[in-house]
């Protein structure tokens, strides 16, 4: 364990909610940038206010725009909210671990080597790694090939695979239980 500048000991366990906040914030910023350049949806410009209020405030999908389009109020609030998520999540991660180590740990860990070696942690971790990889690859492929970054069907498939990957990864790390159940 290392000490940070305040003299507090850094623990290695980052709360799950902090990582989720950073991921959702970065994902939102990417979607905002794609939306401003008319690349988030093949035919429409997305109104974040309309999307998140289920069209109570305005229509979620506006007229098609070519080129750059920025809605002052809606896009600014959405970008600020995403930046806030990244800020709060990063602050929490920084309290528990060095931010650079956390980012490095996303790529260099014991999950990805299990893609081709089930003997590392059994079939659960291998299945976990494949579900995570296929879910991310499917979302990226469909978004790039069809500009379907906010398509409900793509989310359904991607979320099912990614959630299964996270669940299997957690299950592969559970301590062994009793053999006898009665």
Image (cartoon, grey):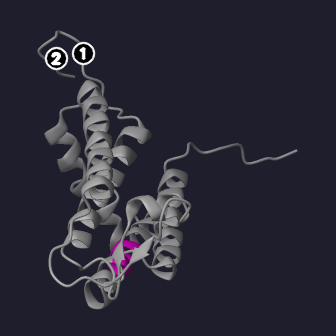
Span colored in magenta: 133-139
SS state under label 1:
loop
Q: What x and y, as percent, mark residue 81?
A: 33, 45
Crowd rating for badge 2 (residues with CA inside 10 Å; few <14, some 14–19, many 20+): few
Q: Residue at x 25, y 45 (%)?
A: 83
Q: Name which quarter of the figure residue 13 lies in.
A: top left
Residue 108 against residue 112 in the figure, above or below? above
* Residue 26: % across, % down: 26, 55
Is residue 134 highlighted in magenta?
yes
Q: Which residue ends up furthest to the top in the rendered image?
A: 7
Q: Is residue 110 magenta?
A: no
Q: Is residue 144 above or below residue 49?
A: below
Residue in the image at 42% along x and 58% along y: 49
| Residues at circles 1 and 2 in contact by the CB criterion of under 8 Å | yes
Task: Please give the label number shown on residue 3.
Answer: 2
In this picture, is 87 found above or below 68? above
Question: Where is residue 143 shown, x and y percent of the image?
Answer: 31, 81
* Numbered label tally: 2
- Identify the main secondary structure in magenta: helix
N-terminal of the two: label 1 or label 2? 2
Inspect this view and state whether residue 173 appears. yes
Question: Spatial distance from mark 1 to mark 2, Cα to Cα?
Answer: 5 Å
Q: Which mark is residue 157?
A: none
What residue does disc 1 label? Answer: 9
Quadrant occupied by the N terminus: top left
- At a point 25% along the width and 22% down the height, the residue shown is 10
Q: Is residue 113 above or below residue 78?
A: below
């Amino acid at each position: 364990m290392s000490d940070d500048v305040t003299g507090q000991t850094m623990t290695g366990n980052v709360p799950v909610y902090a990582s989720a906040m950073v991921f959702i914030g970065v994902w939102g910023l990417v979607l905002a940038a794609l939306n401003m350049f008319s690349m988030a949806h093949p035919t429409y410009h997305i109104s974040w206010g309309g999307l998140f209020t289920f069209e109570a405030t305005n229509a979620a999908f506006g007229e098609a725009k070519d080129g750059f389009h920025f809605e002052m109020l809606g896009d600014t609030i959405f970008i600020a909210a995403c930046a806030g998520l990244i800020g709060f999540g990063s602050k929490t991660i920084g309290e528990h671990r060095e931010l650079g180590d956390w980012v490095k740990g996303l790529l260099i860990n014991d999950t990805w080597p299990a893609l081709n070696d089930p003997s590392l942690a059994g079939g659960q971790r291998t299945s976990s790694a494949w579900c995570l990889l296929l879910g991310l690859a499917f979302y990226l492929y469909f978004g790039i090939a069809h500009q379907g970054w906010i398509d409900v069907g793509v989310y359904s498939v991607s979320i099912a695979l990614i959630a299964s990957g996270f669940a299997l990864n957690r299950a592969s790390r559970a301590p062994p239980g009793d053999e006898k159940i009665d």
